[in-house]
């Protein structure tokens, strides 16, 4: 392989969700950990099922499988601790995975205009075309949390206190 071809290669972590494989850029992964207790608490945050404690941090658990394969995961082999970016900030998020993860090098083909926002691009590995994920689009960030909180607050306002222009739930 030529030096220029090697420079085009990037590292990715392949993860299993059910029967499908997806890729995440390796520079966005903090670690791979065994499943631990998920602490659940009453909340209205979409896409977050609870938190785990890892290295002194509270890490939200986001099961992205429903958005990608159409069903929630019932079995978890690992949590992939990934970095989620929003603005100038970065936080950890735990992504449940069902099988082994693998580190590979591959060339990323950019996502097209018709691809979903969670698709960062495509790569070829072992004869398969694999979707590279944009975790920022799959996991909730402050903008989604703020929107959801505003929607919940509107539901709490008694009908007699709403102005004429406000939507009804």
Image (spheres, rainbow, N blue to C red):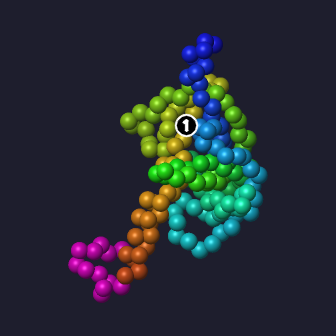
Q: Left or right? Give the position of 135 relative to 161.
A: right
Q: Which residue is mark 1?
A: 132
Residue in view at x 50 percent, y 34 percent:
121
Please name whichever residue, 133 or 127, is drawn nearer the observer in this view of the structure.
Answer: 133
From what the image shows, is residue 45 above or below residue 103?
below
- Of all residues, the one furthest to the left in this rendering is 164
Q: Is residue 161 magenta?
A: yes
Q: Say which residue appears at 39% left-offset and 37% top-offset.
A: 114
Residue drawn at (62%, 24%) of the image = 127
The residue closer to the viewer here, 43 or 141, is 141
Quadrant of res 17: top right
Mark 1 lies on a secondary structure that is: strand
**Which secondary structure class fits the magenta region best?**
loop
Answer whether residue 163 is visible to the viewer in this image.
Answer: yes
Locate the N terminus by quadrant. Answer: top right
Relative image position of residue 155 (x, y in whole percent): 39, 77
User: What's the residue at 73%, 41% (across, down)?
Assistant: 100
Residue 64 point in image, percent of width and height: 57, 52
Q: Is residue 1 left or right of residue 118?
A: right
Region of the chain picked out in magenta, as a range = 158-169
Left or right relative to 78: residue 26: left
Across and down, in percent, residue 163 comes to 25, 80
Residue 63, by quadrant, is: bottom right
The reply to whether the magenta stretch includes residue 12 is no
Q: Most extreme residue toward the front, as rendered?
A: 88
């Amino acid at each position: 392989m030529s030096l220029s071809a090697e420079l085009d290669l990037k590292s990715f972590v392949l993860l299993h969700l059910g029967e499908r494989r997806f890729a995440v850029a390796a520079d966005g992964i903090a670690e791979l950990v065994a499943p631990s207790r998920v602490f659940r608490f009453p909340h209205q945050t979409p896409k977050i099922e609870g938190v785990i404690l890892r290295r002194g941090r509270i890490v939200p658990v986001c099961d992205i499988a429903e958005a990608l394969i159409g069903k929630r995961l019932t079995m978890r082999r690992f949590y992939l601790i990934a970095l989620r970016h929003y603005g100038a900030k970065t936080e950890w998020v735990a992504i449940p995975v069902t099988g082994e993860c693998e580190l590979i090098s591959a060339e990323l083909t950019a996502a097209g205009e018709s691809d979903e926002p969670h698709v960062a691009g495509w790569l070829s590995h072992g004869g398969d075309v694999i979707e590279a994920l944009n975790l920022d689009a799959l996991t909730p960030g402050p903008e989604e949390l703020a929107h959801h909180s505003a929607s919940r607050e509107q539901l709490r306002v008694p009908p007699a206190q709403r102005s004429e222009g406000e939507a009804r739930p």
